[in-house]
Image: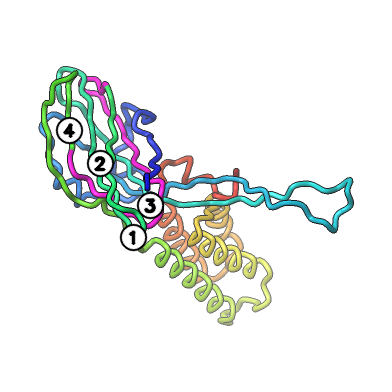
Amino acid sequence: MPVNLIPMANSSIKGSRIPARFLPGKNESGLLDKLNVPQIDITYIRSYLHRTKAWRVEGYYPSRPSSKKAKEYRLNINGFKAWKIGFKNKQQTPVDITLHFRIQGKYVPGYDYKQTYSNLLPDMEAEMVVVPGLKMVRVRLDKVEVHTGSNLLSSTEVRTFMPYWNGNFVFSFITACLLGVSFLFCHTYKQGIPVHNSTTNWIAILGFYLAFWEAFNITPVIIMLLALLVGPFFLHDQVQKIALMVLGCFYLWAVWRKRSSIKDFLIGAFIH
C-alpha cells in the first residue's frame, strides 16, 4: 500500500530572520541534540499539525423548490502530524540534503521514503517540511545524507522516531473546562457584582466555546485576542480579569504550538 506524502521540500523560505524559539510549532530540542551533521547545521526541528481543508458536496435538499435547489457543501478539516526542519549550509559549495524516512503504522506496512532539498547555497538557510499523508502513522528518521553534485560528502545514521506531542487534545479540552468552570464560579460568586450581567455571560460563553473548538482544530484566534482586549473593560471583578488573561494566554499558546506559521496561527479553520 503506497503512502502518500505531501512533498514540500523546495517550497521553503530561505534566510529566515525569526529565531527558532519564536517560530510556531513545538520545538523538538531532544531530537535536535542527537543530530550532528558535519557539512550542515540543523538549526531547528518543530512539530505541528498540518491542516487540509476541502468543501464536500452534501447533495440536494428535496424539500426546497426547484428554483432554489442548490448544492450544499460541508467543510472537511483533517489534521496530520508534520515537521519543519531548518538547515544552514556550512560548505563553500552548494549542497543537496536528503533525509531518509521509514513510515510505520498499524494498517500500513513499513515504507521507505526520502525527501531532498536541492542546491542549498553556501551560508544560506532553508526549511524542509515533512507531511505524512496518512493518520496514525509513525515517522522514523533513518539517515541524513549531504551531496555536492554526484559526490557524497557525509551520511549520518539517526534511526530515531520523529517526536510529536499527542497531548494537544487533552490539553485543549482541560483549558476549555477551566475557562467554563472559572467563569461559572466567578459569575455566581456575589461580590458586589450583579449576578445577571449579560456582558459577563457572553464573555464567559465565548471564552468557553473558543477553547472547546480549539480541541477540534477550529481556532478563531482573532476573536480570542479581541476578548482579551475588551474583557478587562467589561469585567469588574479582579478574579474574572485574571482568569480571562491567564486562560486566554493558555489558549493562544496551545494554538501556537500546533500551527506552522503566523498566518496559520491567525486564520481560524472555519475561514476558507
Residue 9 appears at what percent x and percent y? 34, 32
Location of residue 58 in the rendering, given as x and y in whole percent from the top left corner: 69, 52
Q: Which residue is mark 1?
A: 106
* Residue 196: x %, y % from top left: 68, 76
**Residue 134 lies in the magenta stretch:** yes
For the point 52% across and 65% down, the residue is: 212
- Mark 4–mark 1 CB contact (< 8 Å): no
Left or right, 124 with respect to 24, comes to left
Residue beneath disc 3 = 257
Tag 1: residue type?
A: Lys
Would residue 173 be found to the left or right of residue 237 on screen?
Answer: left
- Residue at point 58% right, 53% down? 223
Prevalent SS, magenta region: strand
Residue flagged by tag 2: what amino acid is it? Tyr
Q: Earlier in the sequence, mark 4 or mark 3?
A: 4
Q: Which residues are magenta?
A: 119-143
Q: Which mark is residue 145?
A: 4
